[in-house]
Image (cartoon, rainbow, N blue to C red):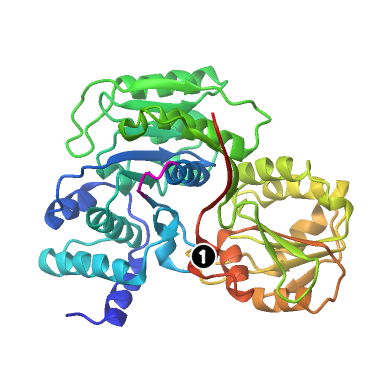
């Protein structure tokens, strides 16, 4: 038997392969694992923003209805088990390691080359086969058409909001990006899509629905059953997630006799996630993983509606590289202009797939937008310790930007237990 540390070392080594789009290796690996035919239903979610929140919201609704579910999302904030949640909680380490051992053994036997994302997806599928799962929720990693998750058969496909992102990989227009996302449509199955105003994008998605492909053979098959979901433009992303989750719920056989329980209070770690300072009385950290321009725009629109900014607050920001940092920061600048923070603290996310943008570069970008006098700490630990020392009086610390930064902060604050990292429902209403 391979030792746990050796299994984990092997999994870590797969990061060296970087990113590889395509379904061939994942499809081969799934076949070689010889997993039993799933008895659960599968929901596959893609989109530029909101896909993770939609998965979390649908999972929370399933949990409220006492329907066992397993979700696969990425990235993780603190530890890898977060990518595979059973009924909202990160899977047990022993369960993860058992599934990892099975994937490792298959790779040793077949010599199939896997990326880190592909390996973790396979671990999730093994875990799902060993747990009493009735619904599997899959979040795409990047795009859709060539994302490893499309190698998994699905009963319902969901596409959340679309925006220009990863243009170097997915295409430079919204139509091109929509085509990549809509390719997760499955033959004869529901394709639930947030309605878009752009007529060219609409036509693209309709064409994708009418020309679905079998994920393994690329052979043309039955059209998908396209369903547009109208969401108000000013809706928060929690409201969008509820709308998309409710639409997907209507297609689940296991829930056909159960009303969708609208989630009014969802603690989704790293997404509008509140936690109290461990040392400063009355200080709340608000963690928000708005890590691209469209995500920042949506998050700041939601944040502006809150009254908390009338009290002293501190901005803690860190980011991975952006194609256009100016566009990324504009909504945050507007929030700061409307409600000037007591301090702006810039830092560099650690331990992520992408390196953090140096503080000095962030300072230049902030200065260009009229936000000066930022405090710089290369290490998030030093930034948090400075805030926790009471160096500046605040009632709220808005930690926003890279999800890796949020993971750093959760770890530093000691808020990284399974309970802390679980998706928790605070309130539901029957729809």
- Whole-percent x, y for residue 318 in the image: 66, 63
User: Is 288 located above or below residue 259 in the figure?
Assistant: below
Q: Is residue 329 visible?
A: yes
Q: Residue 389's quadrant in the figure?
A: bottom right
Q: Residue 420's quadrant in the figure?
A: bottom right
- Whole-percent x, y for residue 360 in the image: 72, 69
The residue sitting at 73% across, 78% down in the picture is: 385
Q: Residue 107's quadrant in the figure?
A: bottom left
Magenta stretch, overall SS: loop
- Is 68 colored magenta in this rendering? yes
The residue sitting at 19% across, 66% down in the picture is: 102
Q: Which quadrant holds the C terminus?
A: top right
Q: Secondary structure at mark 1?
A: helix
Q: Magenta part of the protein: which range?
A: 65-69
The residue sitting at 63% across, 60% down in the picture is: 319
- Whole-percent x, y for residue 120 in the image: 33, 60
Q: Which residue is mark 1?
A: 419
The residue sitting at 70% across, 64% down in the picture is: 361
Q: Is residue 161 visible?
A: no
């Amino acid at each position: 038997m391979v030792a746990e540390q050796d299994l984990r070392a092997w999994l870590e080594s797969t990061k060296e392969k970087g990113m590889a789009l395509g379904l061939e290796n994942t499809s081969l690996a799934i076949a070689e694992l010889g997993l039993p035919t799933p008895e659960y239903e599968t929901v596959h979610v893609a989109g530029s923003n909101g896909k993770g929140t939609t998965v979390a919201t649908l999972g929370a609704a399933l949990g409220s209805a006492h329907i066992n579910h397993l979700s696969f999302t990425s990235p993780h904030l603190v530890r890898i088990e977060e990518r595979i949640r059973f009924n909202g909680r990160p899977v047990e380490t022993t369960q993860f390691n058992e599934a990892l051992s099975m994937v490792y053994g298959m790779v040793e036997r077949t010599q199939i080359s896997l990326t880190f994302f592909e390996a973790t997806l396979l671990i999730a599928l093994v875990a799902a086969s060993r747990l009493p799962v009735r619904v599997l929720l899959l979040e795409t990693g990047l795009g859709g058409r060539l994302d490893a998750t499309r190698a998994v058969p699905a009963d319902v496909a969901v596409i959340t909001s679309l925006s220009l992102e990863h243009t170097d990989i997915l295409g430079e227009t919204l139509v091109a990006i929509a085509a990549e996302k809509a390719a997760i449509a499955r033959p004869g199955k529901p394709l639930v899509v947030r309605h878009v105003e752009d007529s060219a994008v609409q036509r693209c998605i309709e064409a994708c629905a009418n020309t679905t492909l079998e994920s393994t053979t690329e052979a043309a098959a039955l059209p998908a059953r396209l369903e547009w979901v109208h969401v108000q433009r000013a809706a928060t992303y929690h409201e969008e997630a509820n709308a998309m989750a409710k639409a997907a719920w209507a297609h689940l056989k296991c829930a056909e006799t159960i009303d969708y329980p609208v989630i009014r209070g969802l603690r989704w770690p790293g997404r509008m996630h509140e936690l109290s300072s461990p040392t400063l009385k009355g200080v709340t950290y608000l963690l928000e993983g708005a890590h691209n321009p469209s995500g920042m725009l949506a998050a700041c629109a939601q944040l502006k509606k809150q009254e908390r900014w009338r009290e002293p607050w501190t901005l803690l920001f860190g980011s991975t590289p952006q194609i256009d940092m100016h566009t990324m920061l504009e909504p945050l600048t507007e929030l700061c202009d409307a409600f000037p923070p007591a301090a702006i603290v810039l830092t560099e996310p650690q331990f992520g797939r992408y390196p953090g943008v140096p503080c000095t570069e962030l300072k230049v970008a902030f200065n260009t937008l009229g936000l000066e006098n930022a405090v710089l700490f290369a290490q998030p630990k030093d930034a948090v310790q400075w805030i926790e020392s009471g160096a500046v009086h605040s009632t709220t610390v808005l930690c926003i930007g890279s999800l890796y930064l949020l993971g750093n902060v959760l770890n530093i604050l000691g808020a990284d237990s399974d309970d802390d990292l679980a998706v928790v429902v605070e309130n539901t209403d029957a729809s």
